[in-house]
Image (cartoon, rainbow, N blue to C red):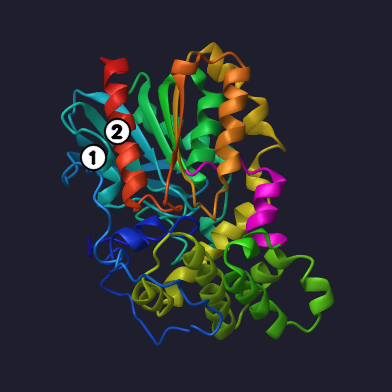
Amino acid sequence: ISRYRYPAVLLLSFIFSRSSAFATPNMSSSKADLTYISKPASDASNQINNPVTYPQSMYPDIEPTKSGLLNVGDGHQLYYEECGNPDGVPAIFLHGGPGGGCDERSRTFFDPAFYKIVLFDQRGSGRSIPNASDELELSLVGNTTPKLVSDIEAIRKELGVDKWGVVLGGSWGSTLALAYAQAHPDKCRCILLRGVFLFTPDEVSYLFCNGGTYGQNPEAWESYCQYIEDTSSDWSREKTNLLGAYSSRLHSDDVATREAAAAAFVGYELSISKTFIDPSIIEKYLGTPSVLIPFAVMEVHYMINAGFVKRGQLLDNVQCMADHKHRVSIVHGRNDYVCQPQAAWRLTKALKQAGCPDEDVELEFVSGAGHSDSEPGLADAMVRATDRFRDVLK
């Protein structure tokens, strides 16, 4: 894993799942800037080092059987790989972020004997070229949701896949999975969503604008705001547009400003992304702000552009999913402070109202789980879902 660059943003899932996820030969580190980072809650039961065991574990690590770079236009080449059974049912994993990238753990949510598992790093992410950590502005060219949907189609055609058996997406990946399923409903059969994010205005405002997370982690929210206030020459204006304020600093010509903004922004999300937060992980990765800067920028890029989807689009367009008899499984942490459980509930109700039979729409709220797919309860539920899909896809 150390020979690749594995970035992460909104979910930051594999930051928590693999402490080596950002290890690269040229990655330099410095003392972490913890000035605006809230203190994690206590963990007297030592769940960080001894997590609860669930019945279903993830599948063993596997290596790709095929990998390459696909030119999709706008100056982007996407890294992709195939794993598992070359003749199996095609399944594609859509990572979070935007900008999260995939890692070796992303392959292990599927039975490798049954599925042909396809992973790719989205524009500006991971091993795709240009990478936001190297060429920030170029990585944002043509970096929109419709373009990413088109990229999935390009990969499908390149790999000779007639139809995806499973499209799996978590957090931002769930947004992209829904956008793809609604744009190309005849090209997918089963959809697995973890930590649903519909990109409605209230979801973006809750997370980044109006202090919705204050109710769960007040110190994290206040720290997120305090950085802007402490560095602002016009706080009365900037407090009404916190995303814009972060964007201006992340695009600053001053390196120290960019690094401080990245530490505050990403540190905020790290503080609310998992039930049990390991302080050493936060300190390790905030010690490399030069790696985290571009991914904070990419996330803000999508947030201030409403995800490049029309208001309410992903709920308004569920009818085509019902018409094409999509099988949908939704897994959501009951204690998810990043993507609210109400999004999963709204989507479930909309799908059933559109005519999806109860047996085709499954919603599982996982007790004690937060947002990251490294939460043991979420990983268990996701693997059980892909295993259930085998019966549908045989």
Which residue is located at x 38 percent, y 75 percent?
279
| SS at circle 2 | helix
In this rendered view, identify the residue nearer to me: 333 or 293.
333
**Does 174 lie within the magenta span?**
no
**Does 203 lie within the magenta span?**
yes
* Residue bearing mark 1: 56
Specify which label sits upstream in the sequence, 1 or 2: 1
Magenta segment boundaries in residue numbering: 195-210
In this rendered view, identify the residue nearer to me: 216 or 84.
216
Which residue is located at x 65 percent, y 74 percent?
222
Compared to 358, does 55 lie above or below?
below
Whether residue 159 is visible, yes or no, is: no
Mark 1 crowdedness (10 Å alpha carbons): few <14, some 14-19, many ≥20: some
Q: Amino acid at mark 1?
A: Gln
Q: CA distance from mark 1 to mark 2?
A: 7 Å
| Image spot of residue 5 (x, y percent) | 32, 62
Relative to 109, is 279 on the left or the right? Answer: right
* Residue bearing mark 2: 384
Q: Amino acid at mark 2?
A: Arg
Relative to 88, is 337 on the left or the right? Answer: right
